[in-house]
Image: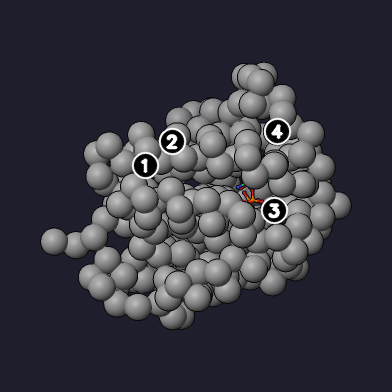
C-alpha cells in the first residue's frame, strides 16, 4: 500500500503555495493546514490568538515559534486520527519549527514524506502578490491578471467577497521576502539533509505547477528519494 501524502510546502511569499495547497489537498483528499489562513481567520474573529498574531503579520514578521507550533501540532493530531496524511502550507518557517515538527511527527509515527520547495525570483513573487485578491470567507487566492475569478470580486468556490490582504502592500511584501531568505530558506538544507527535499520551478502556469507537484508526490509515496521535481 502507498504511504499517505504528508507534505510540507515551502517557498517565498507569492511562490504559489496557497494555490497549490488547495489543489493538492483536494486531489489527495487530505486536510489542508495553512498557518497563514488560520491566523487570518483568528484576526477576523478577534480571538486572543488573532490579536497576538495581528501586529506581526501586518509588519511582515513571523509570529513567534511557540504560538505557531502549539497551534499546528494540535491540528495535526486531529488530522492524523484518520491516518490520512495532510498538506502543510506556510509551516514550518524556521529551523526551530521544523525541529519541533519533526520531533512531533516522528514520535507520533507519521513522519513528513516530502518537502516541496517552490522556487521563484523575488521580482516574480512581488508581481504575483501585487495582483492577488483573497476570498474573505474561504481564503482562496486569485490574481486579477494571472488567475481571475469567473465573476469580478466574487469567489468561484464559495461566493465570498474578494479582498486585498493587509500585508500585500509592496514594502511589506519586500520585507516578507527578506524574512523568508533569512529565516525560512535554511529549511531547504534541513530537508535536503533528510533526503526529502524536492525543488519545483514555480515560474510556470498553475496547472503545470500542480502536474509537477503531483508527479513528485506520486514518486515519493511510491518510495523514491528526494531531488528536483
Ligand atoms: P502566509 O499566508 O503563509 O503567506 P506567505 O507565505 O507570505 O505566502 P503567500 O500567501 O503570500 O503566498 P503563496 O506562496 O501562498 O502564494 P499564492 O498561492 O497565494 O503567511 C502570512 C503571515 O502569517 C506571515 O507573514 C507571518 O506573519 C504569519 N505566519 C504564517 N505562518 C507562520 C509560521 N509558520 N510561523 C510564523 N508566522 C507565520 O499566490 C500568490 C498570487 O499569485 C495569487 O494571486 C495567485 O493567484 C497567483 N499565482 C499563484 N501561482 C501562480 C502561477 N503559477 N502563475 C501565475 N499566478 C500564480
Quote the CA–CA distance across marks 3 and 4: 21 Å
* First of labels 4, 2 by sequence position: 4
In this view, 177 is above or below 142: below
Q: Which residue is mark 3?
A: 129
Q: Residue at x 55, y 61 (%)?
A: 10
Is residue 189 among the parts visible in the rendering? yes
Crowding at mark 2 (Cα within 10 Å: few <14, some 14-19, many 20+):
few
Quote the CA–CA distance across marks 1 and 4: 23 Å
Q: Which residue is mark 2?
A: 75
Asked whether mark 3 lies closer than 8 Å to ligand 1, one says yes
Q: Nearer the viewer, mark 3 or mark 2?
A: 2
Q: Which residue is mark 4?
A: 53
Query: Percent position (x, y) of residue 108?
Result: 34, 47
Residues 132 and 72: in front is: 72
Residues 89 and 17: in front is: 89
Viewed as shown, does residue 167 lie left or right of 15?
Answer: right
* First of labels 1, 3 by sequence position: 1
* First of labels 1, 2 by sequence position: 1
Q: Is disc 2 placed on a helix, strand or loop?
A: helix
* First of labels 3, 2 by sequence position: 2
Q: Is disc 1 placed on a helix, strand or loop?
A: loop
Quadrant where the image shows the N terminus: bottom left
Q: Is disc 4 placed on a helix, strand or loop?
A: helix
Asked whether mark 2 lies closer than 8 Å to ligand 1, one says no
Query: Percent position (x, y) of residue 37?
Result: 57, 38
In this view, 125 is above or below 132: below
Query: Percent position (x, y) of residue 35?
Result: 56, 41
Amino acid at each position: 500500500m502507498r504511504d499517505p501524502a504528508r507534505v510540507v510546502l515551502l517557498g517565498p511569499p507569492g511562490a504559489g503555495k496557497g494555490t497549490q495547497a488547495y489543489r493538492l489537498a483536494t486531489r489527495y483528499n487530505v486536510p489542508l493546514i495553512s498557518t497563514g489562513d488560520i491566523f487570518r481567520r483568528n484576526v477576523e474573529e478577534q480571538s486572543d490568538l488573532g490579536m497576538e498574531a495581528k501586529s506581526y503579520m501586518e509588519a511582515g514578521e513571523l509570529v513567534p515559534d511557540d504560538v505557531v507550533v502549539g497551534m499546528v501540532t494540535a491540528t495535526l493530531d486531529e488530522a492524523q486520527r484518520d491516518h490520512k496524511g495532510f498538506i502543510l502550507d506556510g509551516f514550518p518557517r524556521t529551523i526551530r519549527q521544523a525541529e519541533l515538527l519533526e520531533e512531533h511527527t516522528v514520535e507520533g509515527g507519521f513522519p513528513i514524506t516530502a518537502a516541496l520547495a517552490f522556487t521563484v525570483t523575488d521580482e516574480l513573487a512581488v508581481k504575483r502578490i501585487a495582483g492577488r485578491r483573497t476570498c474573505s470567507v474561504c481564503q482562496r487566492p486569485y490574481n486579477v491578471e494571472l488567475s481571475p475569478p469567473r465573476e469580478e470580486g466574487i469567489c468561484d468556490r464559495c461566493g465570498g467577497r474578494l479582498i486585498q490582504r493587509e500585508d500585500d502592500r509592496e514594502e511589506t511584501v519586500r520585507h516578507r521576502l527578506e524574512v523568508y531568505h533569512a529565516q525560512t530558506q535554511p529549511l531547504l538544507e534541513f530537508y535536503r539533509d533528510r533526503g526529502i527535499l524536492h525543488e519545483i520551478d514555480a515560474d510556470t502556469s498553475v496547472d503545470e505547477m500542480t502536474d509537477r507537484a503531483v508527479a513528485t508526490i506520486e514518486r515519493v509515496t511510491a518510495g523514491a528519494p528526494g531531488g528536483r521535481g
